[in-house]
Amino acid sequence: MAAPVTKTFPIKHCNFEAKVKTAGNGPPLVYLHPAGGPLWDDFVEGLTERYTVYAPHHPGTGETVRESIYSVESLWDLVLVYDEIFDALNLQSVPVVGTSFGGMMACELAAHRPERISKMVLLDPIGLWRDDAPVAPYMVMSPGKLVATLYKDLSSEPVKKVLQMPEDPDAAATLIADLVWALGATGKFVWPIPDKGLKKRMHRIKAKALIVWGEDDALVSPIYANEFAQRIANSQVEIIKDCGHVPQVERLEILKPLVANFLAA
Amino acid sequence: MKVTSFHFMPYRDLPDDFPKGLDSAWVDAPWWEYGDANKVSDFYNWSIDELMLAARLGFDGIGTNEHHQNPYGFMCNPNLFGAILAKMTRDQGLDDVALVQLGATLAATSPPIRIAEEYAVLDCISGGRLVAGVPLGLGCDANISYGVTPMDQRERWREAIDLMLKAWTAKEFFAWNGKYYQLPKVNLWPRPVQDPHPPLLVPGAASSSTWDYCHDRNLPYAYLSYFGGKSAYNVMDRFWERAAAKGKDANPYRASFLQLVGVAETDRKAEEEYAKHVEYFYHKLLHQPTYQIAPPGYSDYKSLLNVLKGGKNFLQFADLSIELKPLKAKDMIANEFVVIGSPATVRDKLEAMARRLNVGHLMVVMQFGSMPHHVACKNIELFGREVLPHLQKIWEDKAFENAWWPKKLRNRAVKKREMATA
């Protein structure tokens, strides 16, 4: 499998220089990363077996200019930035896979341009709010509490691998700075409560959706699976046992065929 | 040197086992478990009395600030207190003391011209004695308690300062069409007495962006740390390096430093008297994780890297990465987080600190933690009589102009001593 390459697209809206990581063969598919920033893990790599995966980096994260987040002033701006990235990639009707914050963005894009998103896979998305099950305040937690909120089992091999820090102190400092900045750059659109009107817009979504939730997700309770399902006409829910907020790391062996079958159907 | 008596207005009577089980004393400490409005009635009144005592003893300034949802200090709007102090000092013939509002949080007040108005009111009532602090605001206050988006906060703050300055000085109606604030017709009533406007003061917690902001605009910087002069060397050295790099002189009045101080007749007596209040302050009131002070997006990327790559010793204690609970008062005194001792000890330590850090403004906190009113008054009196006159002479030998203090008060310390010797 060829290593992913990053393509640059100057976007007119907000004068944003978009960076899109891409690899794979086959029809296009867009992957939208979570609040912690871009990742190209085994799950995304797996998608490249059948699809040409495009993974845009949220403004300010990954390979984009850090300060570019300042000119994307609102969620409306952000949706238009993505819309123009889709234009640049010449995507007319494309499946989108989104994790957590990326899942929220997938819904926003599908509500904004219903014809543009053919299918959606939402992995433990944020974007809705229930007073009786508040989304955990993941931006204001100690690192220890954050990882314990994200993952069910911190001793499992895939989780340990994700949490491994580089030994070089400078590299570790940069990694932490990038992670904190990514939380801030995505958090800009959900602070202080991740309920920015998506519930009013979701009736517009036409894409068929697979909603996947870790049964033990402590960041966004799995009761939100039905909140999303109720608002997306053509949707199905899959709950994964023994899994926290990040099925793509914690239960890849179960998630991978679920997603592959849904996308192929 | 200009010496300001600064007050946090803490909750002085938390139970011994506080903060058992709480992640933080800020935001997370339930009022309904710990708060008593009748006690708070005394705390507010005592705090005002303590500041007024400092004014009578000849301190150059009296200072208040803004914090929310915590027992550390809860003057939710410092201008409520500034208004009381402006009126009381004026009525009592103490109209040579500056009101150092350090200050109201522009970025968490909407629209921020509310602060421009309140500051102008204070300047009017006090007759031109306001120092207008423009704090960025801590994450726990602005972001968590008041809901401001961390990523927006620094830009909001800059825009709010620009708006305030224009609202104070414009001699025409104007429309403000900003990124964060839109006002169709600005015509501020009242305007400050000081011409063109009161001096600004920018408090900070070691962000390199804030230093650059100060130097680019020729504004003074107040480093607010609770970890004493020694732990501030790195920070203030960098501040002065940046000043030099931007062509600014080493005028000490560009910088302020905050220090907790306890004075008694002897070193030993001081340690006995203040130890438990020191521990109350550091163990209970400063029980706060860094993620509350600076949530993601609050520090800009450059400052973030600067701190993270600075290594463990850059901020030492100031980043709160060191567990304070195992430290006893004697450790904190030895590390000079707090300056505790006889008048001679306190004089020497503060003078050495001021000269090493090259600061022309000192903010002393004389009531901290659980310190009762009568002990605070004794502390302020001893300091005022035995330490203050000595400190006020520092920098007098150098011909530095203090352009960051209310004009009518700049030569005050000299005048007072002349009167005393006459």
Image (tube, helix red, strand yellow):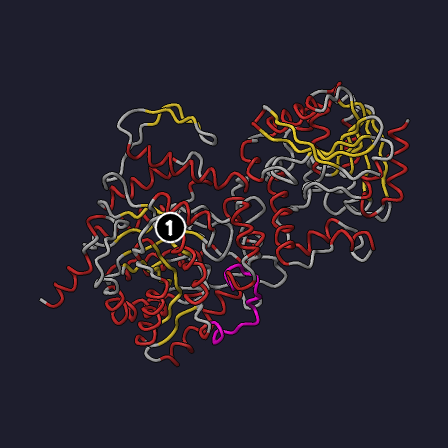
Pick the front one: B267 or A73: A73
Pick the front one: A27 or B108: A27
Could you tell me residue B111's position as x and y percent? 42, 34
In reply to whether residue A4 is colored magenta, the answer given is no
Is residue B29 visible from the viewing direction of this image? no
Which amino acid, by three-letter code, is at mark 1? Leu
Could you tell me residue B284's position as x and y percent? 53, 63
In reply to whether residue B327 is colored magenta, the answer given is yes
Residue drawn at x 33%, y 50% is B248
Could you tell me residue B35's position as x and y percent? 51, 56
Classify residue B106 by image quadrant.
Answer: top left
Pick the front one: A219 or B165: B165
Is residue B336 visible from the viewing direction of this image? yes
- Say whether residue A31 is left or right of residue B413: right
Q: What is the chain identity of the residue bearing mark 1?
A: B
Residue drawn at x 31%, y 46% is B83
Q: Write down the region rendered in magenta.
A: B316-332
The residue beneath circle 1 is B102
